[in-house]
Image: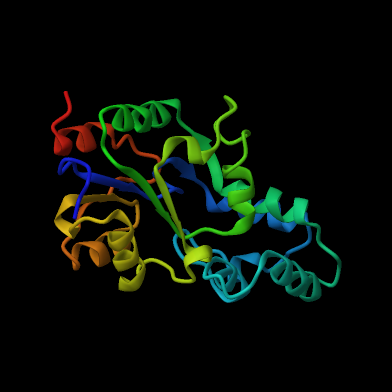
Amino acid sequence: MDTNNNKMHVVFDLGGVVFRLDKMIAIQRFKEIGVTRVEEFLDDYAQKGIFGDLEAGKLTAEQYRDELSRIVGKTLTMEQLEYAWTGYAAELFQRNFDALRRLRREDFPVALLSNTNPFMMRWARSNEFDGNGHSLDDYFDRLYLSYEMRMMKPAPEIFKAMIEGEQTVPENILFIDDSARNCEAAAALGIKTLNPDNGGDWRPDVFSILGID
């Protein structure tokens, strides 16, 4: 079933793991563009209301823009919304990009599983992502994105879909997420998990688990 010589599949969360996330910067940016009650919708791990519907794939980017424009009483642009959402990406670490590349060089299958949305991905999948002309896609073999899959962590279904996509068994997957709730949901299915702090250096633990010097 696994075509990668039984190498452990390594699956990362995005915000909090690949980069340090900061909800307060995102809140500040949303307020700058006129979304004054944004605290009611934004969370560190799972959004609420139309923000959650966007990340769950229940609303398209355009439908979300139209609805949020109606709520705030003025037309918001796609560029403004991308600016606000990407406030979550507070700090990117070259050490993480180097580690992801090393894992792939050593033939570990590397994937991403993220609760995210089209505005974050418009930036992340562009050459502006890492500051060195590379997109998110350059660091991963596969991306499992909530809004495309129309399901969100910690629902068991999204982890089952990821397992199927990886074409391996749960015990052969290491999942790294800064949300304890998401790790608990993955572990309940037999997936090995690591729960680093937001922005923490996960490399020593990941390399140790994988047997990398």
From the image, which quarter does the N terminus lie in?
A: bottom left
Q: Nearer the viewer, residue 104 or 167?
A: 167
Look at 29% across and 32% down and name the residue there.
Answer: 103
Answer yes or no: is residue 25 visible: no
Look at 60% across and 66% down and name the residue there.
Answer: 39
Vertical side of 62 occupied by 101: above or below = above
In the image, taking residue 37 as reference, residue 58 lies left or right, namely left
Vertical side of 9 occupied by 181: above or below = below
In the image, taking residue 157 as reference, residue 61 lies left or right, namely right
From the image, which quarter does the C terminus lie in?
A: top left
Vertical side of 144 occupied by 140: above or below = above
Look at 27% across and 59% down and name the residue there.
Answer: 183
Residue 106 picture location, percent across and down = 25, 28
Residue 45 picture location, percent across and down = 44, 61
In the image, taking residue 70 as reference, residue 100 lies left or right, namely left
Residue 163 picture location, percent across and down = 28, 60
Which of the 4 image quarters holds residue 139?
Answer: top left
Which of the 4 image quarters holds residue 38?
Answer: bottom right
Residue 25 picture location, percent across and down = 61, 48
Q: Nearer the viewer, residue 64 or 181?
A: 64
